[in-house]
Image (cartoon, rainbow, N blue to C red):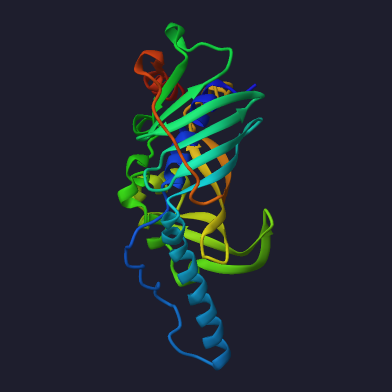
Amino acid sequence: MPSRGMKASAIGVAAVMASAVLTGCGGDEEPKSQKAGTASSGSASASGDAGAQEQGTTQVRAAYDRTAEAETAKMTINMKLSAPQESITTDGKGALDFQEGDSVMTVTAQGKSIEQRVVDQVLYQKVPGQKAPGGKTWMKIDLKKAAQALGVNAGQIGDPAQSAAYAKAITDQDVTKVGQEKIDGVDTTHYKVSVDVAELPGGGQLRRQVGPTLPMQVWLDGDGRLRRQQLDMSVKGAPSAGAKAENSAAPQQIKMTMVMNYSDFGTEVEAQAPPAGQVADMTNEVMKQSRQQS
């Protein structure tokens, strides 16, 4: 059974990173210039390799715009959070509005099926057969406030106005073409990408949480749109409740892998907040648990 610290961190990290990733499409920013040390000339072979790499970088950068142009899509998410002797796996299926970052999903976690909506960066969840505090049907978590409790500046990362963040943080040296693969029967090109965290909005603070680079993999279809995106990272979270006293101040390293698949572009998405009278605000409780375990 995951500890309270793991649960609190899992809720916050999952919500925060989902918000960041799901609004990470679109934008018309100019790409970042190549890093120092990138060759500008060389043999025909080297030039050919550099040209292919540059083309791959261009394709990956453009994928966010091309995906956002579809406005909406169906999606699935598989996320695994793990710490020493603890792990949580979550699966989600639903639809996403790329422009607003809103979504409607059914999430399965720890054997429970949860109805979930994200509207205006607020997460709403309903567990069938269970009541939230006060007998309410739904609970909500303000993602911006939860992010602040975890020390992650996800308010900026999840802002649609900052939607070109990933593209701006990728240079020619950061992209490697893996090859051709099929995703749900669709031909795609697979790339490995290294994102410079310092180039993301709020990167200084985020760098302290996840390190200098963010490993990412993307699979692009023939129209240059994202069909799959995978993030792998280690996040500094609250220490485990079972940690020894002398080590209780040490932050717990939470490893996270998130895989998102996109399909049925242009599908209808109706993400609406539940009636206020049916909602219990759990944001402060999540923040309180996070502080207690930090």
Residue 62 higher or lower than 234, as above or below: below
Q: Quadrant of residue 240?
A: top right
Residue 174 higher or lower than 24, as above or below: below
Q: Quadrant of residue 20?
A: top left
Tell which residue pokes out farthest to the bottom in this image.
Answer: 44
Which residue does the image show at 62% across and 29% down from the upper left? 108
Q: Tally the numbered discs.
A: 0
Residue 238 higher or lower than 50, as above or below: above
Which residue does the image show at 54% across and 79% down from the upper left? 52
Left or right of residue 253: residue 149 = left
The percent position of residue 51, horizontal first and vertical second, equals 50, 82
Which residue does the image show at 39% across and 75% down from the upper left? 36
Q: Is residue 239 visible?
A: no
The percent position of residue 102, horizontal first and vertical second, equals 41, 38
Which quadrant would the C terminus be assigned to in this image? top left
Residue 255 higher or lower than 189, as above or below: above
